[in-house]
Image (tube, rainbow, N blue to C red):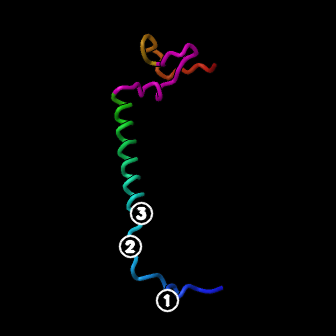
Amino acid sequence: MTIDANLENGPLPNRGITDCICLLVFFLFIGFYGSTVMYGFKNGRPDKLLRPVNGDGSLCGVAGLDDYPYLFFLM
């Protein structure tokens, strides 16, 4: 097995950044993800994710079920 002559004394001294494009794509993804989350909270109903649901599909503690904020019926 032969060792590359450039690596005999350790790593190469002329190293540089090689993942600039990946870093740019990562930041674009994070920005897009943040914008979709903000759009979802602004135009959606996040309470449907956080509240329990009764057997009829109604959210507990909302619209006529104000007296039962934590009641949960199993189907």
Cα gap from disc 1 to disc 2, whole angstroms: 18 Å
Q: Nearer the viewer, residue 66 or 35?
A: 35
Q: Is residue 29 above or below residue 54?
A: below
Q: Nearer the viewer, residue 63 or 41?
A: 41
Q: Could you tell me residue 52's position as x and y percent?
A: 51, 24
Q: Residue at 48% of width from left, 19% of height from top?
A: 60
Give the crowd class for mark 3: few <14, some 14-19, many >=20 residues within 10 Å.
few
Q: Is residue 19 magenta?
A: no
**Local SS, label 2:** loop
Q: Is residue 41 above or below residue 22?
A: above
**Local SS, label 3:** loop
Which residue, given by chain and number where applicable, does mark 2 sit on? 16
The tag earlier along the polypeptide, 1 or 2, is: 1
Q: Residue at 34% of width from left, 35% of height from top?
A: 38
- Residue 22's label in the rendered image is none
**Local SS, label 1:** loop
Amino acid identity at mark 3: Asp
Magenta part mainly helix, strand or loop?
loop
Q: Could you tell me residue 57's position as x and y percent?
A: 53, 16
Q: Nearer the viewer, residue 18 or 45?
A: 18
* Image quadrant assignment for residue 4: bottom right
Give the crowd class for mark 1: few <14, some 14-19, many >=20 residues within 10 Å.
few
Cα gap from disc 1 to disc 3, whole angstroms: 25 Å
The tag earlier along the polypeptide, 1 or 3, is: 1
Which residues are the magenta region? 43-60
Which residue, given by chain and number where applicable, does mark 1 sit on? 9
Amino acid identity at mark 2: Gly
Q: Is residue 67 above or below residue 35?
A: above
- Residue 19's label in the rendered image is 3
